[in-house]
Amino acid sequence: MKYLKPSLVAWALSVSATFAGPQGFALHDAPQPVINVRYEKEDGSRGDMEDFRGKVILVNVWATWCVPCREEMPTLDALQAELGSDDFEVVALSIDRAGSPVVRRFYDEIGVTNLKMYVDKTMLSMTALRTVGLPTTILIDSQGQELGRLVGPAEWDDPEMVSFLRSFIE
């Protein structure tokens, strides 16, 4: 803990969950503000979290070199196939410094077909989203507020998890 920034530690300790969802998903007592993170799309154009306003999103901060991230990616792809709509999107936000080409290679290797590519080569999103490890997955409501998060891998296509997430979309 001595290597973590004191403000990050204070924030982590202050966030309390009134409800634990499936696989340890922790919901906050009240929605939390989210900093407007920027990213690059596969075509090289830039975007930010405001692009998703009006839509519930599940932001998964990950990297191709993170073994647990690699293992959960097919379940995120399956979740997007099942729940993806105008009202919900899985936003797989890669922090790979090599950018879109390495992420595209990885998607092709494992057969990801439903997730769009979002990349933050600067890795600034990790600080902005207060991630303390990879993968970190954050549920954000249609007003851009964080509802809860799960640190570590999960089986996102598990029926209990799908039902849990569906309840925030409907």
Image: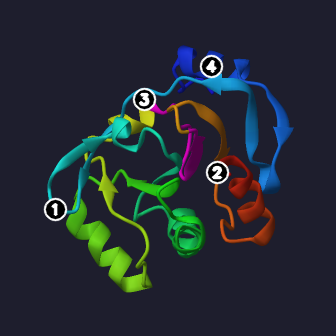
**Mark 2 or mark 1, whichever is nearer to me:** 2
Q: Residue at x 81, y 49 (%)?
A: 21
Identify the residue under disc 3. 128
Separation of residues labelled 2 and 4 (CA atoms): 27 Å
Separation of residues labelled 1 and 4 (CA atoms): 35 Å
Give percent across and percent down for residue 53: 43, 38
Give percent across and percent down for residue 66: 48, 61
Amino acid type, residue under disc 2 in the picture: Ile
Label 2 secondary element: helix
Tell me which label, 2 or 1, sits earlier in the chain: 1
Separation of residues labelled 3 and 4 (CA atoms): 12 Å
Separation of residues labelled 2 and 3 (CA atoms): 24 Å
Tell me which label, 3 or 4, sits earlier in the chain: 4
Tell me which label, 1 or 4, sits earlier in the chain: 4
Amino acid type, residue under disc 3 in the picture: Ala
Mark 3 surroundings: few (<14), some (14-19) or many (≥20) residues within 10 A: few
State the mark number for residue 43.
1
Identify the residue under disc 4. 11
Identify the residue under disc 2. 169
Q: Which residues are magenta?
A: 129-141
State the mark number for residue 129.
none
Label 1 secondary element: loop
Q: Say if the magenta span includes residue 15.
A: no
Q: Quadrant of residue 26?
A: top right
- The one nearer the camera, 146 or 64, is 146
**Mark 2 or mark 4, whichever is nearer to me:** 2
Give percent across and percent down for residue 9: 62, 21
The number of callouts visible is 4
Label 3 secondary element: helix
